Amino acid sequence: MTANKLLLFTFCLGWLLCRSAIAQAIDSQQPTLTYNHRTQTLSQNNDVAVAGTVQRIDSQPTGIHILVKTEQGMADANLGPYVPNDVRETLATGQQVRVVGISKVSNEQNHLLVRQMEISGRQVTIRNEHGFLVRAQSENAPRLHKGESQLNGGN
């Protein structure tokens, strides 16, 4: 072996060893992610309850918003797009409502993402315990049970 080849071999070997050591150091510095699933629901820890009089009802692309006048001031409550038709028909300005949900800031404004709503003595679920919108089941829609499909007749 010539001196140049020996020098090149030594350089390559050193580079490989150095790269291996750096890779091990980087690998040991990476955080280990663990996901702790809470048994409680998120909404129950952060729930806000508001009772008052409906001042305004707005239909927006994100669903129905109602402006509720409370003793503390006005609250913008987002009911979402899946409010049952009978509730939509019942909802009117001047009506007393109680809404429970999570307060969120959007476009520098506070909104209450409604989870439960009490209107005319009736409890209506708008979002489930995880904050997902609940779509009202139409009475005319076929109800499928586990293992049943319209395609195979339940077989």
Image (tube, rainbow, N blue to C red):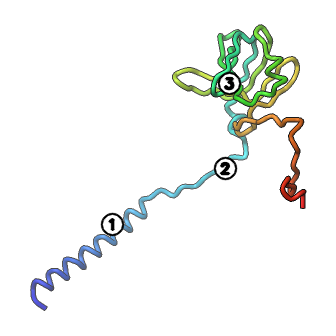
Residue 102 x %, y %:
67, 29
What separation in Å lies between label 1 and label 2 (alpha carbons)? 34 Å
**Residue that carries the numbered disc 3 in the rendered image:** 78
Q: Amino acid at mark 2?
A: His
Query: Which is nearer the N-term, disc 3 or disc 1?
Result: 1
Q: Left of 50 or right of it: where is 118?
A: right
Q: What residue is drawn where x is 63% and y is 51%?
A: 36
- Which residue is depicted at the point 36% across and 67% down? 23
Mark 1 and mark 2 lie on one chain; the one further toward the N terminus is: 1
- Reading the image, the residue beneath label 1 is 22
Residue 21: image location, x then y, percent: 33, 70
Q: Nearer the viewer, residue 5 or 49?
A: 5
Q: Residue at x 51, y 58 (%)?
A: 32
Q: Which mark is residue 4?
A: none
Location of mark 2 (residue): 37
Query: Looking at numbered disc 3 in the image, what kind of residue is underneath it?
Result: Asn
- Where does the image place residue 137, in percent across and percent down from the top left? 83, 37
Taking depth in this image into account, of 61 and 73 the one nearest to the observer is 61
First in residue order: circle 2 vs circle 3: 2
Using a 10 Å C-alpha cutoff, classify the residue at mark 1 as few (fewer than 14 neighbours), some (14 to 19) or many (20 or more): few
User: Residue 113 appears in which quarter of the rendering?
Assistant: top right
Residue sitting at the far left:
3
Up/down of 137 relative to 3, above or below = above
- Give the distance between the C-alpha atoms of the residues marked 2 and 3, in whole angstroms: 27 Å
